Image (cartoon, rainbow, N blue to C red):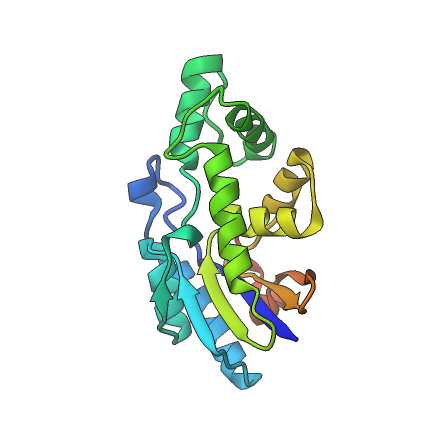
Amino acid sequence: MGEILLVRHGQANSAATTEEDYDRLSPLGFDQATRLGHWMRAHHYDFDHILSGTLRRHRETAQSMGFTGEEDARLNEIDYYRLSQSLLDRHGVPLPDHDTFHDHMPKVFAAWKEAEIEGAETFAAFETRIAELLSEAAVPGRRLLCVTSGGVIGMIIQQVLGLDLMKLSKVMLPIWNTSMHRLHVRSDETMLAGYNAIPHLEGPDYAEARTHV
């Protein structure tokens, strides 16, 4: 049996208003990733292959974890800032803040899927690149680490479980920074075996280190 371990990047610049400004780890993000790397080594995690997205926050997370590997742009996040601006321009839906993000995301995905708003890629193109990535990553007998973003993790889980669009949004919203999501790969199927685990940040002493954005 093979395994794919998906890791979301550490906390980025959550005060940003553009993708470019968001794409860097905060001091806490570096600490989260370093703690995860220490936890993995303490529990004897090793991998046959390592992938990360090409975004700065992906590289910084992998490096802080103590891993280097191959970059794959298919692990890059969706352009949520551009999609949000398009939703505002087309339908007058205000840009989200911390309190409204849970309502905003389903609206973005619904409008994006129906091609009512535009981002860096179409929803169909996003689905296709994730399907192709998952097909290539699902190799029986291999342990693969992928450092990526919440939208990619959500879409991978959506495709593995066959979730609808609303449930996809609900899967994405709770994803912690530096959380682990485990897939088991058999010859005939890929199964979800773990979701949103943060053992390196458990306990009351780390409560302030657990973040979503």
**In the figure, is residue 189 to the left or right of 133?**
right
Q: Which of 78 and 9 is in front in this view?
A: 78
Say if 198 sits above or below 20 in the image. below
- Give the side of residue 178 with respect to residue 18, left or right: right
Image location of residue 173, percent across then percent down: 59, 43
Left or right of 211? Residue 182 is: right
Residue 64, picture quadrant: bottom left
* Nearer the observer, 91 or 199: 91
Q: Quick one: 17 or 3, which is closer to the camera?
A: 3
Q: Position of residue 7 (x, y in %)?
A: 51, 62
Give the answer, above or below, for where 125 lies relative to 108. Answer: below
Q: Quadrant of residue 65?
A: bottom left
Residue drawn at (56%, 61%) of the image: 179
Residue 176 horizontal/vertical position (percent) = 56, 55
From the image, which quarter does the N terminus lie in? bottom right
Q: In which quarter of the image is residue 61?
A: bottom left
Residue 90: x and y, percent? 44, 14
Query: Can residue 111 be seen in the rendering of this structure?
Result: yes
Number of marks in the image?
0
Give the camera-side residue of 205 and 7: 7
Work out which residue is located at the far front of the displayed protein and give it: 188
Viewer can see residue 150: no
**In percent of the image, x 50 and y 43: which residue is there?**
128
Residue in the image at 50% along x and 34% along y = 123
Q: In this view, does 66 lie to the left or right of 203?
A: left
Going 35% across and 70% down the picture, which residue do you hit? 63
